[in-house]
């Protein structure tokens, strides 16, 4: 399993790289699954990097690193930029399992 994330809090100096990395380690511990995670640490506004979705940069890194066939990959995302990212990375499927109304509320 592979994970992609945008972490603008690093650029905003709200979180450190170490704090973000620790959060992903904790996520893996809670899930009981090893996940290779890459993230864009750049701030908001127009993308100034290749790693922020919807640009396909981090997807390309995973494709090359693991020699993936993108058409055999399933991308699951919940944000508006995810379909564009999946199309740009040539992933075959985008699933949007979380509605914006319930995001962040674990009771719903």
Image (cartoon, helix red, strand yellow):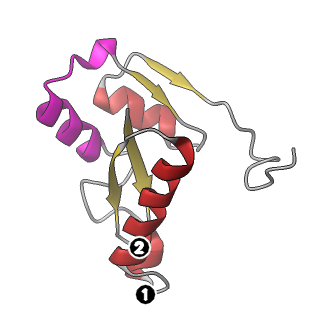
Residue 36 percent location from the top left of the image:
31, 44
User: Label 1's element?
Assistant: loop
Residue farthest right in this picture: 108
Quadrant for the N terminus, please: top left
Can residue 68 be seen in the rendering of this structure?
A: yes
Q: Residues within 10 Å of mark 1 (few under 14, many from 20)?
A: few
Image position of 80 (left or right of 90): right
Image position of 86 (left or right of 62): right
Residue holding disc 1: 13
Residue 85 percent location from the top left of the image:
40, 37
Residue holding disc 2: 43
- Which residue shows up at 82% across the image and 47% down it? 101
- In the image, residue 77 lies in the stretch drawn in magenta: no
- Which residue shows up at 74% across the image and 56% down it? 104
- Which residue shows up at 34% across the image and 75% down it? 17
Can residue 45 be seen in the rendering of this structure?
A: no
Quadrant for the C terminus, please: top right
Region of the chain picked out in magenta, as a range: 56-72
- From what the image shows, is residue 84 above or below residue 9? above
């Amino acid at each position: 399993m592979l994970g992609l994330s945008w972490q603008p809090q690093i650029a905003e100096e709200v979180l450190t790289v170490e704090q973000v990395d620790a959060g992903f380690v904790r996520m893996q511990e809670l899930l009981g699954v090893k996940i290779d995670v890459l993230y864009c640490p750049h701030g908001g506004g127009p993308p100034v990097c290749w790693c922020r979705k919807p640009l396909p940069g981090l997807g390309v890194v995973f494709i090359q690193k693991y020699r993936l066939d993108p058409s055999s990959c399933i991308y699951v995302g919940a944000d508006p930029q995810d379909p564009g990212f999946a199309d740009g990375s040539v992933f075959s499927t985008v699933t949007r399992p979380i509605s914006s109304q319930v995001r962040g509320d674990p009771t719903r």
